[in-house]
Image (cartoon, rainbow, N blue to C red):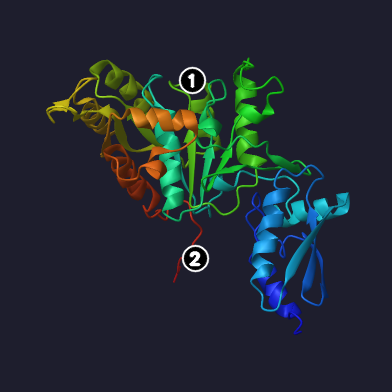
Amino acid sequence: MPTPDLSAIEAALATVKDPEIHRPITEIGMLKGVDISGGIVTVGVFLTISGCPMRETITDRVVAAVSKVPHVTEVLVELDVMSEEQRAELKKLLSGGADDREIPFSQPGSLTRVYAIASGKGGVGKSSLTANLAAAMADMGLSVGLVDADIYGHSIPRMLNASTPPTQVEGMIMPPTGYGVRVISMAPFKPGGVTQPVAFRGPMLHRYLESFLKDVYWGDLDVLLLDLPPGTGDIALSTASLLPGAELVLVTTPQAAAADVAVRAGTLAAQTHQKVAGVIENMSSFPCPKCGEPMDLFGIGGGSLVAEQLTEVLGTNVPLLGKIPFDVKLREGGDSGHPLVLSDPEAPASLAIRAIAEQLGKRPRGLAGLSLGISPNRK
C-alpha cells in the first residue's frame, strides 16, 4: 500500500490555523512532529496552555486537513503543552520582539480603520447595531475586531456568541471569536459571572480599556469597532486619548429628544479633535404588516437632524450613513446570539446594516499620519 508523502502532510498542516491566534500552527511553534506508519499519520501538537478551550477545534482542523492527503487512512492527534520557554518565544513572535507592547492601532503606520460607535443616551440599540455591523463586515471577508468598551454594561459577547474565556499566553490575551469577529469584553474577567456589577472609577476604566487595546493579540485587522457606553464620560475621553485616529459613528433614533442628546455626544469631537464618520438612525419606520403604510413608532427625522447639526457645528460634512428599520428580530437575534445580518440577510434591517458596513468597511484610509518613506528634495 502506498505511503502518504511527508511534504504533502506538512503542506496540509500549514493550512491549519489556530482558532485564537489565526495563524498556521506550523508558523507559531505548535507543530510537535509527524509520524507515518503505513496509512496512519500521527500528528503531535503543542497547545499554548494545558486547559486550552480550543483543543477540540484544533484537533478537528488537523484531522480534516491531513485526511485529504492521498493514501492517508487514519489521523491521530497527540496533544502536548508548550513549556514556559516555548510560550515566551511565541509571545516574542506575536509581539514582534517588543518587550512592552504599544497600542498597534495608534501607530502612524497602522492601516486598521477604527470606528467608535457612540450614542448620546442608552436604549437606542447601539450594541445590537455594533454587533451586526461587525458580523456583516466579517461576512464580507474583512478581518474584524470588536472591543466591548461599555465596561459597566457589556453585552457584546452574548450577542456574538463569543463567551469563551480568552486564553492568556505570557500575559498576552487571545480574544475569543464569534462569527469571525475577534471580541474582548469585561464579561470573562468577572469571577462572579454575568450578574456581578462592575464598580470602577475613571482611572480603572481607562486602565482596562488600555489593556484591551494593548495586551490583546488582535493580529492584522482591517477594521476595529468599539462599542462605547452612552454619553460623553470617561470611556469616550479615554478612547480619544488612546486612539486619536478613531472616527466616531453616532447612533440615534428618529425621536427629536434622542437626536438632541446625540448631537451633544457628537459635538465632543470638536474638543477631542476626532472625525465623525457619520450618523446612523436606528428603529426607523417600517411597513405596517396589514396595510403596508410606513409606521413611525419613534418619530421621524432624528438621524437627518443630527447629521445636519453636526455638519454645522463641526464645520465638516457629517453624512447620514443609513436608516435601520425597526425589526423585533434584531433584538431577538441579540438575545439568542444569532446576528440578524446572518440569520436573515434579506430582512430590510439586515440590508440596511450591510449597506452601512460596506460604506465603513471598504472606505480607503487617507495618508495622514502614515510614513511614506520619502524625503523632500531640498535642491
Seen in the image, is 299 located left or right of residue 275? left
Q: Amino acid at mark 1?
A: Gly
Q: Residue 128's quadrant in the figure?
A: top left
From this viewpoint, is residue 316 visible? no
Spatial separation of the CA atoms under disc 1 and disc 2: 41 Å
Residue closer to the observer: 207 or 358: 358
Q: Amino acid at mark 2?
A: Ser
Identify the residue position indicated by label 1 in the image: 233
Local SS, label 2: loop
Q: Residue furthest front?
A: 1
Q: Nearer the viewer, residue 223 or 61?
A: 61
Which secondary structure, mark 1? Answer: loop
> How far across and how far down the image is residue 311, in percent?
25, 33
Residue 149 in the image: above or below residue 82? above
In the rendered structure, the answer to whether residue 298 lies left or right of residue 153 reads left
User: Which residue carries the number 2 mark?
Assistant: 375
Q: Residue at x 74, y 68 (%)?
A: 74
**Residue at 75%, 85% in the rendered image:** 2
Spot occupied by residue 332 in the image (x, y as percentages of width and height): 41, 29
- In this view, 308 is above or below 15: above
In the rendered image, the vertical position of residue 240 relative to residue 43, given as above or below: above
Answer with mark 1 or mark 2, whichever residue precedes in sequence.
Answer: 1
Q: Nearer the viewer, residue 205 or 378?
A: 205
Q: Percent position (x, y) of residue 214?
A: 64, 41
Identify the disc placed on residue 319.
none
User: Residue lying farthest bottom?
Assistant: 2
For image coordinates 42% across by 56% down, the residue present is 367
Q: Quadrant of the N terminus?
A: bottom right
